Image (spheres, helix red, strand yellow):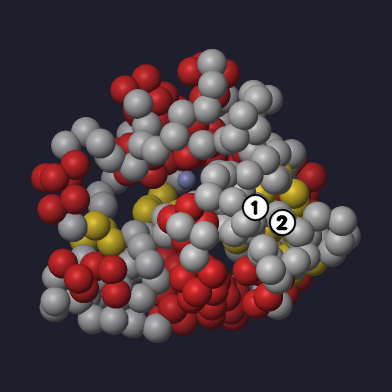
Amino acid sequence: MSVALLFFDGIGIGENDPGKNPFAGYKSKFFRAFIDVNNFKAEFGGIIVPTDATLNFPGYPQSATGQTAIFTGVNAAEMMQGHINGLPTPTLRKVLLSESIFLKLKKLGKKATFANAYSKHYFEIRGEKLSATTYAVMASQIPFRWYDKELKEGKAVPADLTGEFLRKFYPDVKVIMPEESGKIIADLLCEYDFVMYEFPFTDEAGHNQDFELALKYIDRIERFLWSLLTNVDLDKHLVVLTSDHGNIEDLSTKTHTLNKVPTIIWGKGKEKVAQKIKSLLDITPAIIEYLTEQI
Ligand SMILES: [Zn+2]
């Protein structure tokens, strides 16, 4: 019984309007919920749970506070008295380092991993300006996966699901199909209690109001999910997809949106987990309760 948590930046539930929402134009097999369209079923028996991303604070939800909330269960917007964009601030880093889902699972004796492939260069150029997921992993001191080791061995996933982004910097990176990335996550789920993956690029396509790029990413995500869900034994494992705030589902605006985000849940015990999810704050507790068989 393992859990995969798939995090996609900036995906909300928007209108069923192909002029605004690339998911409507694409006819997604997974992101099928729209405002005023009561379809909460995704392919492979997935349950779509519209999830509140506002953290009970006015204004547009932002990445630093939203992601900290997802990966810790702590209301980061309340702590900061507002939504904080971009990368975690020193205060939010402390929350991630002391409350991260990876640390909580480690204390419970669970084996966890982050599937994304890193480069040493990322840490060298960024200093302390690291992503929320990176701090969440650092909290438990589990090893990172590297582009020049685990990725080459088929044991890590490129953040963009194909490796095209990494290849711009490292020409020896082999570009793979998104289906291969899905299979890698499925394989890791047999070895670990918890596997997390982050796709950060969707938010950028939303800010740029770039339909073509949005559709390219959605196609990649659909192929990745199809492969992952084909390869995972859904009678044994749980797959949870979520996001930090809306953005790409409304390309008529550059900004984030106030829309709910789709948490999609597949596999063993999905109904009970779905009942636990109302807001971003519920993701970490629900996964921990599931892995400790409290739900
Ligand atoms: Zn953004």
Label 2 near ligand 1 (CB < 8 Å): no
The type of residue carrying mark 1 is Gly
Q: Residue 213's mark?
A: none
- Residue shown at 37% from the left, 32% from the top: 88
- Residue shown at 25% from the left, 36% from the top: 129
Quadrant of res 232: bottom right
The type of residue carrying mark 2 is Gly
In this image, 98 relative to 126: left or right?
right
Q: Can see residue 186?
A: no
Tags 1 and 2 touching, CB below 8 Å: yes
In the rendered image of this protein, does residue 222 appear above or below residue 65?
Answer: below
- Residue shown at 28% from the left, 61% from the top: 117
- Residue shown at 59% from the left, 51% from the top: 253
Mark 1 and mark 2: span between their CA atoms?
Answer: 6 Å
Q: Which residue is mark 1?
A: 12
Q: Nearer the viewer, residue 60 or 277?
A: 60
Residue 109 drawn at (x, y percent): 43, 40
Residue 61 drawn at (x, y percent): 58, 35
In this image, 163 relative to 57: left or right?
left
Q: Which residue is mark 2?
A: 14
Residue 6 drawn at (x, y percent): 52, 57
In this image, 59 relative to 209: left or right?
right
In the rendered image of this protein, does residue 251 appear above or below residue 186?
Answer: above
Q: Say which element carries label 2.
A: loop
Q: Nearer the viewer, residue 24 or 255?
A: 255
> Neighbour class for label 1 at 10 Å: few (<14), some, many (≥20)?
many
Q: Nearer the viewer, residue 262 or 14?
A: 14
Q: Can see residue 168?
A: yes
Quadrant of res 38: bottom right
- Locate the N terminus and report the quarter of the image it occupies: bottom right
Residue 22 drawn at (x, y percent): 63, 69
